[in-house]
Image (spheres, helix red, strand yellow):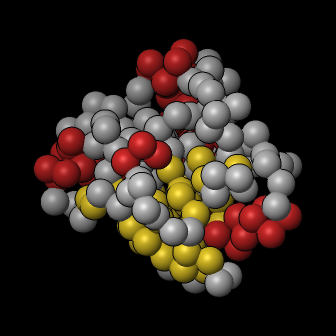
């Protein structure tokens, strides 16, 4: 079993093409690429810590439809566009999630401003996409923050093992290398 991280898929969201500068010609092309990237990386027995904003519109039936198409067991941290996930009862939508890996602590929240001020360890978040990569890059060792928005990950989930390699390198990365 492998644990993955990802945020801000915004399945079905035409506005994401523009405001996040996604390189797809249509919503259908974007949805297909996101689904292919997710299921190409994740196996059925893997865990995916999803860090918010699954689909637009965020209605329970839409959320269930997407969840049924995604591989892996989801740990779902709700984002600001996840009202339908909260109401769907198809997933346990939580406000934050903590885990340890490689001797490090990680806390996942959708919006980095929602992290507790006294947090210890690394903060994993989404919300900012690639709109402000200078302030919210993929990885910043000075602030111990990781932005797992799909735009910064190359439109596929990131394994925690791969993340630990970047953390160990101690470098700042605007986006996932590769």
Give the percent coordinates (x, y) of residue 123.
53, 58
| Of the pair 138 and 65, the residue shown nearer to us | 138
Left or right of 121: which side holds 97? left
Residue at coordinates 68% horizontally, 40% vertically from top-left? 137
Residue at coordinates 74% horizontally, 42% vertically from top-left? 175
Give the percent coordinates (x, y) of residue 109.
41, 54
Q: Residue furthest top?
A: 18
| Of the pair 177 and 171, the residue shown nearer to us | 171
Left or right of 147: which side holds 96? left
Q: Is residue 39 visible?
A: no
Q: Image quadrant for the N terminus?
A: bottom right
| Of the pair 28 and 150, the residue shown nearer to us | 150
Using the image, determine if residue 157 lies above or below residue 160. above
Left or right of 92: which side holds 52? right
Give the percent coordinates (x, y) of residue 150.
59, 43
Quadrant in the picture for residue 68: bottom left
């Amino acid at each position: 079993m492998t644990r993955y991280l990802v945020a801000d898929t915004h399945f079905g969201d035409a506005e994401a093409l523009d405001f996040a500068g996604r390189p797809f010609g249509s919503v259908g092309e974007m949805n297909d690429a996101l689904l292919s990237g997710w299921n190409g990386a994740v196996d059925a027995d893997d865990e995916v810590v999803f860090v918010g904003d699954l689909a637009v519109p965020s209605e329970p039936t839409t959320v269930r439809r997407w969840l049924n198409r995604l591989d892996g067991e989801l740990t779902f941290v709700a984002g600001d566009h996840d009202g339908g996930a909260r109401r769907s009862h198809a997933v346990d939508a939580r406000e934050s999630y903590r885990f340890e890996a490689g001797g490090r602590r990680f806390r996942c929240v959708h919006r980095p401003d929602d992290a507790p001020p006294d947090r210890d360890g690394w903060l994993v978040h989404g919300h900012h996409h690639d709109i402000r990569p200078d302030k919210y890059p993929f990885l910043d060792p000075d602030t111990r923050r990781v932005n797992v928005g799909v735009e910064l990950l190359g439109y596929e989930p990131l394994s925690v093992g791969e993340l630990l390699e970047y953390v160990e390198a101690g470098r700042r990365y605007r986006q996932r290398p590769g």
